[in-house]
Image (cartoon, helix red, strand yellow):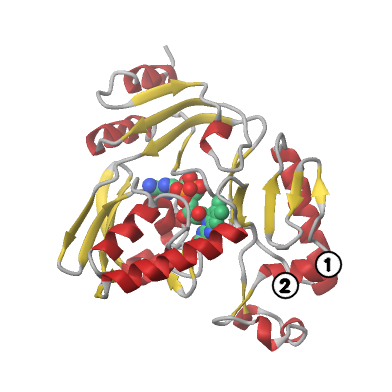
Amino acid sequence: MTSALAALERLQTIPGLTVRPGALLRDYTRFRLGGPCQALLVTKDEAAYRAALDILTGSGLTWTTIGGGTNLIVSDAGYPGLVLQYAAAELAVDGTRVRVDAGADLNALVDFANANGLAGLESMAGIPGWVGAAIYGNAGAYGQSIAERIEWVRFVRCNDVHQFSRAECEFRYRESIFKRNKDWQILSAGLELEPGDQAALQARSAEIRATRDAKFPPTMQCAGSIFKNLLLRELAPEVAAQVPANVIREGKIPAGWFLEQVGAKGMAVGAIRVADYHANLVYNAGGGSAADLVALLDELKRQVRERFGLVIEEEVQFLS
Ligand SMILES: Cc1cc2nc3c(=O)[nH]c(=O)nc-3n(C[C@H](O)[C@H](O)[C@H](O)COP(=O)(O)OP(=O)(O)OC[C@H]3O[C@@H](n4cnc5c(N)ncnc54)[C@H](O)[C@@H]3O)c2cc1C
């Protein structure tokens, strides 16, 4: 028996680990795109998750991790390996500190903080997905990002558990050290928040959720903004000079502004479309393919590059 086959058999014996052979990944992503994986491994139990990682590391098997699947494009052929989903979701509070598992829904974390009168996450209400991926990609919105509140992150690297401070996580705009080390698996995190008024925090979150729901209807098959916004300080002066001042927010220029200039709104390849009201919102109108999505993104990047000499980068993550 090959070592990969033996590893697969051992995975099936881990108590608390659900193994779904041939799971269709489109059922686990908001874009509703993508073919099958070899098997999906799901657990809420840290011991089971670590036992699976112990077996996978050095097994010769190809594997990756997903969270809620809201920022993923899976290829039509699927993923030729195993996909892990760590769904532990406990939340605990101690004074102004919150401890959260990687599989908790980010919205549950925001609601928990608000309900405990803790400020610092309320503007992130409505960002879909789980906490592990929010840390991985330093999710944020309306002037707040998760990095600002992180005190520590616990993760598995080469079968050992490590803990990093916020500084060690090397957070940047939509970046962290975890994004550059895709085999490091986030288990849990500690956040430090500030005392706030429960009702005011809840009202702020409700207001933001209403705005977001109008922009990204909850049933829309998409990944939110598909390209990263651009940092003004990183733009060539001749490009920056073309951007109207009222478009710049917190030192960033929305990728949507550049896309709008090249006429992206309403563009389509097959059933994959750019929203006609938002140039950085690409969605699957139903029955679309990942190949069409990639073709549309390539075309948008080509047009922005030709017009502005600028490379725009996807925020969304690819699995193929
Ligand atoms: C309608 C809509 C609006 C959005 N608005 C915003 C927004 O305002 N701001 C924003 O920042 N994002 C936004 N997003 C993007 C998305 O919500 C975030 O990127 C979110 O953090 C992804 O979480 P997820 O659990 O779905 O991750 P997934 O899509 O499942 O995975 C994303 C990446 O995280 C990695 N990952 C997942 N779990 C772990 C773990 N435990 N350890 C290590 N790596 C892990 C995966 O390998 C993958 O590469 C939006 C998406 C949608 C659909």
Disc 2 packing (10 Å; few <14; some 14–19; many ≥20): some
Horizontally, residue 308 falls left or right of residue 162, namely right
Asked whether mark 1 and ligand 1 are closer than 8 Å, the reply comes as no
Residue 276 picture quarter? bottom right
Horizontally, residue 220 falls left or right of residue 256, namely left
State the image coordinates of residue 140 (x, y, percent, origin top left).
47, 66
State the image coordinates of residue 196 (x, y, percent, origin top left).
26, 75
The residue nearer to you, when weighing 94 against 227, is 94
* CA distance for labels 1 and 2: 9 Å
Residue found farthest to the top: 1
Q: Name the residue under label 1.
A: 262
Q: What element carries label 1?
A: loop
Q: Which of marks 1 and 2 is nearer the N terminus?
A: 2
27 w.r.t. 218: above or below: above
**Disc number for residue 257:** 2
Residue positioned 43% across, 56% down in the render: 134
Residue found farthest to the left: 94
Quadrant assignment for the C terminus: top right
